[in-house]
Amino acid sequence: MNASQTLAQAMQQLPLIAILRGLTPLEAPATGQALVDSGFAIIEVPLNSPEALQSIKALTSLFPQTLIGAGTVLNPEQVMDVHAAGARLVVSPNFNAAVVCKALALGMVVLPGVATPSEAFAALEAGAHGLKLFPAEMISPSVVKALRAVLPPSTALLPVGGITPHSIAAYRSAGASGFGLGSALYAPGRNVQDVRVRAMEFVQALQT
């Protein structure tokens, strides 16, 4: 299965990316289990989390069927580190052509961050599998609708930043393909049961 098919399959299962910023390796197994149990198929550990590569190694080992990767990937060297840790996904807050190129060379799913049509088209031309619309606080549903009108119809558009269960419906109506979920889902020190409850709230919001 190539990277495009891997992303499509995961998005079909549940088009939500769990962003676990601040996760520690000690918390990774139980938090990952709570998310997988809730139906999540995509998990991201930002590289500015404590010992992020160790958490990624633990998650990829425990949940091989889940698309696990790193966020806040800013350069090609980090892409190689993430790949070595077993990750299959690279997510960035920005569009860096060198990051996209290295991820593609390693057969990884790559989702760069974009905020404008120019960035969006440049990222797609570079080979990005989908677009992280970031920060979503400044990219309203009406902007998503405008982007959807001009981008290739199959483009995966994923608003990230400040997404809550209550904001999902408006973005979906505007054409969002899925979402990256940050502090509304997970925050450092949040207990596993709380994460599980929040995960199910997002799943239910997506299904209503």
Image (cartoon, rainbow, N blue to C red):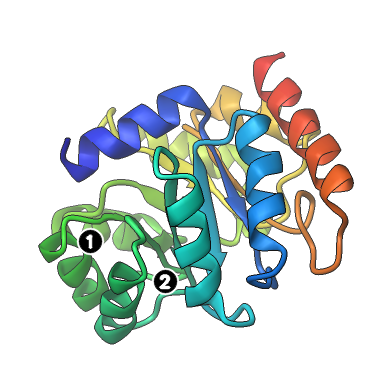
Q: Can you identify the residue that label 1 sits on?
A: 122
Residue that appears at 36% across and 60% down: 87
For residue 70, side relative to residue 200 (left or right): left
Query: Are discs 1 and 2 less than 8 Å apart at CB?
Result: no
Q: Quadrant of residue 171?
A: top right
Neighbourhood count class around disc 1 (C-alpha, 10 Å): few under 14, some 14–19, many 20 upward: some
Label 2 sits on a secondary structure element that is: loop
Q: Give the label on residue 94, or none.
A: 2
The quarter in which the N terminus is drawn is top left
Residue that appears at 26% across and 74% down: 99
Q: Is residue 12 above or below residue 33?
A: above
Does residue 160 appear in the picture of this structure?
yes
Q: Nearer the viewer, residue 66 or 95?
A: 66
Tell me how far mark 1 sits from mark 2, CA to CA: 12 Å
Q: Quadrant of residue 128?
A: bottom left
Q: Earlier in the sequence, mark 1 or mark 2?
A: 2
Q: Is residue 153 above or below residue 16?
A: above
Does residue 96 appear in the picture of this structure?
no
Q: Amino acid at mark 1?
A: Ala
Figure disc tally: 2
Which mark is in front, 1 or 2? 2
Q: Position of residue 125 (x, y in %)?
A: 15, 55
Q: Nearer the viewer, residue 109 or 128?
A: 109
